[in-house]
Image (cartoon, grey):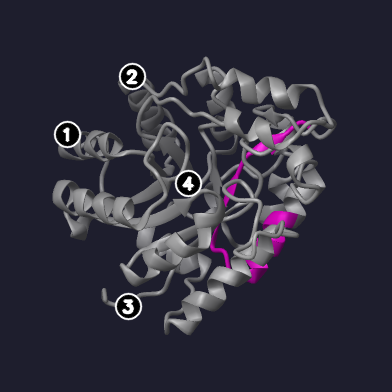
């Protein structure tokens, strides 16, 4: 077992994968997303990973006004680290995806480390009726589009949000090659430690959600980055969310849960809210003899710029 340290819990409260038809508990409006984030923070999440949605339809949104419908409330009610997605949706342009983070200048942003097929079209098979026409259309669109993150895109994000605005990154690695890309930029000096690497397992088009794959990703990161230069977290889609998060803790890593990544609990019932998933993984963490990191500890470990340096006003 790895040396024990306090575990950073990230909660991704809504995302852009699941749609309103799939769960009545998915937060959509600004107040719903704010309540979800605040509840997750109160349950023990020290980092809140945030996407926005159109409050009328629930469609993924990169509109700054939609983000500012919940950012001030979360910032005022909690001291959690706000982590703004640069992924948005595979159907958005890069400028659309980056607009919210450019405005908010958060402590952290996500950064997908490569272009990839990002298939969520298989989710369509589970439903025959939809609340909104855009839902099946969006799912179908992922069969013929690529989630683009070219080397130039990555470098522009590193320069714009990192060098210029002081954000640190949640480096999302959906496959082994993404770790190789991160290692390239680390060796070139374009990213500096401590790196926060999110192993993402279970998205169609990326690496599958299995214990063997998680072990392989950690071994690759140890070899390419050096274990002293990075901390890792594990995000597993669907039913593998809690089992692989538990494995991450045992391996010395951190965890990410939330309704962006899985709508269900280990008993296959719909999670009623994000806090329920946070409480579940927190209970496991504490039963294993670990403690949960507070937001300021996460800031110190990841060398973040501080919550007072973000733009949390409209």
Residue 160 included in the magenta stretch of the image: no
Question: Which corner quadrant of the image does residue 133 belong to?
Answer: top right
Q: CA distance from mark 4 to mark 2?
A: 20 Å
Kindly identify which numbered label has been placed on residue 4: 3
Report the Cα–Cα distance between label 2 and label 1. Answer: 15 Å
Q: Is residue 113 above or below residue 48?
A: above
- Dividing the picture into quadrants, the one containing residue 250 is bottom left
Q: Decide: marks 3, 1 in contact (CB < 8 A)?
A: no
Q: From this view, report whether residue 251 is shown above or below residue 235.
A: below
* Camera-side mark, 3 or 1: 3
Work out which quarter of the rendered image holds the C terminus and state it. Answer: top right
Rendering coords of residue 25 (x, y %): 78, 51
Write the start and end of the magenta stretch as one range. Answer: 36-54
**Residue identified by numbered label 1:** 188
Disc 3 versus disc 2: nearer the observer: 3
**What residue sits 44% from the left and 68% below the top?**
246
Q: Residues within 10 Å of mark 3 (few under 14, many from 20)?
A: some
Task: Tell me if 60 is positioned left or right of 249 in this view.
Answer: right
Residue at the (66%, 32%) spot, across then down = 125
Residues under numbered marks 3 and 2 in contact, where contact means CB atoms less than 8 Å apart: no
C-alpha separation, residue under disc 3 versus residue under disc 2: 38 Å
x and y percentages locating residue 15 in the rendered image: 62, 41
Quadrant of the frame with the N terminus: bottom left
Which of the two discs, 3 and 4, sits closer to the camera?
3
Mark nearer the N terminus (2 vs 1): 2
Q: Residue at x 61, y 36 (%)?
A: 17
Of mark 3 and mark 4, the one earlier in the sequence is 3
Image spot of residue 16 (x, y percent): 63, 35
Local packing at callout 2 (Cα closer than 10 Å; few below 14, some 14-19, many 20+) is few
Q: Which residue is mark 2?
A: 152
Q: What residue is shown with label 4?
A: 108
Could you tell me which secondary element the residue under label 4 belongs to? strand
């Amino acid at each position: 077992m790895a040396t024990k340290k306090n575990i950073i819990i990230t909660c991704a409260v809504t995302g852009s994968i699941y749609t309103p038809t799939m769960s009545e508990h998915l937060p959509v409006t600004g107040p719903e997303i704010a309540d979800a984030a605040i509840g997750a923070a109160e349950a023990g999440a020290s980092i809140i990973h945030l996407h926005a949605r159109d409050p009328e339809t629930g469609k993924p949104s990169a509109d700054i006004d939609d983000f500012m419908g919940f950012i001030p409330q979360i910032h005022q009610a909690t001291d959690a680290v706000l982590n703004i997605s640069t992924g948005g949706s595979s159907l958005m342009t890069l400028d659309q995806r980056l607009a919210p983070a450019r405005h908010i200048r958060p402590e952290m942003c996500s950064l997908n480390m490569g272009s990839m097929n990002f298939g969520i079209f298989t989710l369509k098979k589970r439903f025959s009726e939809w609340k909104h026409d855009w839902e099946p259309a969006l799912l179908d669109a992922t069969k013929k589009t690529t989630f683009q993150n070219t080397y130039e895109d990555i470098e522009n994000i590193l320069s714009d949000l990192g060098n210029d605005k002081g954000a640190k990154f949640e480096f999302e690695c959906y496959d082994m090659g993404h770790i190789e890309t991160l290692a390239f930029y680390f060796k070139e000096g374009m990213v500096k430690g401590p790196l926060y690497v999110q192993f993402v397992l279970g998205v169609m088009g990326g690496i599958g959600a299995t214990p063997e794959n998680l072990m392989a990703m950690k071994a690759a990161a140890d070899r390419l980055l050096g274990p002293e230069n990075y901390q890792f977290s594990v995000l597993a889609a669907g039913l593998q969310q809690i089992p692989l998060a538990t494995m991450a803790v045992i391996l010395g890593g951190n965890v990410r849960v939330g309704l962006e990544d899985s709508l269900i609990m280990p008993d296959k019932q719909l999670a009623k809210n994000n806090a329920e998933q946070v409480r579940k993984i927190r209970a496991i963490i504490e039963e294993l003899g670990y403690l949960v990191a507070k937001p300021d500890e996460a800031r110190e470990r990841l060398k973040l710029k501080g919550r007072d340096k973000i733009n949390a006003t409209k």
